[in-house]
Image (cartoon, grey):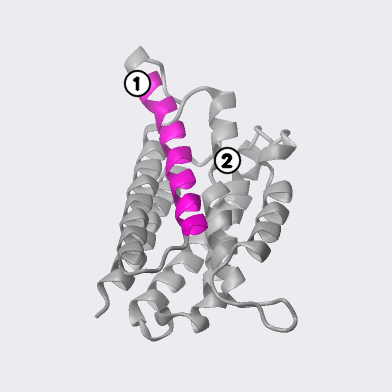
Amino acid sequence: MDLILIIFTLGYLVQHAGAYFLIKYIYEKKNIIGLALETQVMYFIGAVMRILYISDTRLLSFFLIWIELVISIVLSAFIFYLFHKYRHTRFHQISNPYVSYQTIIPICLVLSFFFHPGTKNENYFTVQMFVSMSMFIEACGLLPQIYVSKKIGSIEADISKYLVAMGFSRLLRLVFWVMNYMAGEKFVYLILADVIHTVIIADIMFIWIRDKKKGAILI
């Protein structure tokens, strides 16, 4: 079994553990205060992109990735259900267009057209564009959450568990890229996307650590 593929898939499974903490938080608190629906939408789109490109990669014959994708879709569906159920508790809307998925997704789409693995066909298309689209959208996915968290000024403890899981998933992804780089597959733009994703997670974790040191009352 290919260790590189195991590391790649394990990164997403750790991310799904974070989604479990998020579901647990919403289910117990019965509200979505301090949460950004836009972040969950972009992670869901990232999962859809993985389904679209998997047939053009080594992952096609890797059974664990199919289990991971099913888990991803089920968790996303349940999170969307909870957001809908407790929509009346949501009072922080994304008013900044620069962190709105309506801005981020088109930008990621354009970037994936120019920066992607593989070679375009005569119609200037390749399935590998979906690889970049997935990575770029996931890299920017937490921007709406950071926006909401900074507006509120503090982060619930269970939300921090979600973010820690996201952080570990990115570290595993960086290990995946290092292994690929050493194997001669040097997709610098995809590595950069995951580095940016890790930095974004570190930024939002900084808010939580700062408030904890100050003894701030969490939400």
Q: Secondary structure at mark 2?
A: helix
Identified at 63% across, 51% down, the residue is 84
Relative to 11, say whether 123 is above or below. Answer: below
- Where is residue 82 drawn, in percent x and y? 55, 52
Residue located farthest toward the front when viewing the structure as drawn: 184
Q: Which residue is mark 1?
A: 212
Identified at 30% across, 57% down, the residue is 175
Residues drawn in magenta: 188-211
As shown in the figure, which amino acid type bears the numbered disc 2? Leu
Q: Specify which label sits upstream in the sequence, 2 or 1.
A: 2
Task: Name the disc covering residue 112, or none.
Answer: none
Task: Name the disc covering residue 143, or none.
Answer: 2
- Where is residue 93 drawn, in percent x and y? 69, 36
The answer to whether 168 appears left or right of 152 in the picture is left
Q: Secondary structure at mark 1?
A: helix
Residue 130: quarter of image: bottom right
As shown in the figure, which amino acid type bears the numbered disc 1? Lys
Q: Is residue 17 visible?
A: no
Residue located farthest toward the bottom when viewing the structure as drawn: 61
Question: Neighbour class for label 2 at 10 Å: few (<14), some, many (≥20)?
Answer: many
Q: Quadrant of the N terminus?
A: bottom left
Q: Is residue 137 magenta?
A: no
Q: Is residue 208 magenta?
A: yes
Front in this rendered view, residue 206 or 5: 5
- Where is residue 124 drawn, in percent x and y? 72, 76
- In 3D space, how far apart are the residues under numbered discs 2 and 1 (Cα atoms)? 22 Å
Front in this rendered view, residue 31 or 66: 66
